[in-house]
Image (spheres, rainbow, N blue to C red):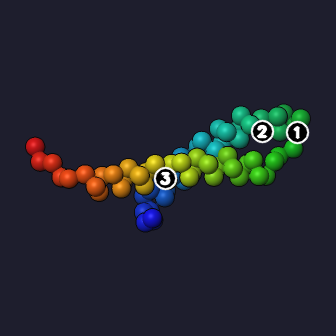
Amino acid sequence: MDINRERLFNSLKIALFVGTLLNLINQGDVLWGDGTVSIPHLMMNYAVPFCLAWYSAWKNHRSRLKEPHQSI
């Protein structure tokens, strides 16, 4: 699998946004003082969206490489 800077940064941006939303949803009770932060859950809430975004961008890139060029 090749590393592409644009794909990497886009995946990081998506992971930051989605991971933050997931942490607010899944660990919202911590904000209100009723719980403690779960570090493994916090990390997974960022890792899963990153992996999904990067993999889907990579698959899209690979499928475009396999398509023959079509002229109009």
Q: Amino acid at mark 1?
A: Gly
Kindly identify which residue carries mark 1. Answer: 35
Q: Earlier in the sequence, mark 2 or mark 1?
A: 2
Cα–Cα gap, marks 2 and 1:
8 Å
Pick whichever, 2 or 25, lies toward us.
Answer: 2
Query: Mark 2 touching mark 1, by CB under 8 A?
Result: yes
Q: Secondary structure at mark 1?
A: loop
- Of discs 3 and 1, which sits in the foreground? 3
- 34 relative to 65 in the view: left or right: right
Pick whichever, 32 or 15, lies toward us.
Answer: 15
* Residue at horizontal 89 percent and vertical 35 percent from the top: 34
Percent x, y of residue 57: 43, 51
Q: Earlier in the sequence, mark 2 or mark 3?
A: 2
* Residue at horizontal 71 percent and vertical 41 percent from the top: 23
Q: Earlier in the sequence, mark 3 or mark 1?
A: 1
Can you say which quadrant of the picture contains the C terminus? top left
Kindly identify which residue carries mark 3. Answer: 55
Q: Amino acid at mark 3?
A: Tyr
Residue lying farthest to the right in this orientation:
34
- Of discs 2 and 3, which sits in the foreground? 3
Percent x, y of residue 52: 54, 48
Cα–Cα gap, marks 3 and 1:
33 Å
**Total count of labels:** 3
* Residue at horizontal 65 percent and vertical 43 percent from the top: 20
Cα–Cα gap, marks 2 and 3:
26 Å
Q: Secondary structure at mark 2?
A: loop
Kindly identify which residue carries mark 2. Answer: 27
Q: Secondary structure at mark 3?
A: helix
Q: Amino acid at mark 2?
A: Gln
Q: Which mark is residue 68?
A: none
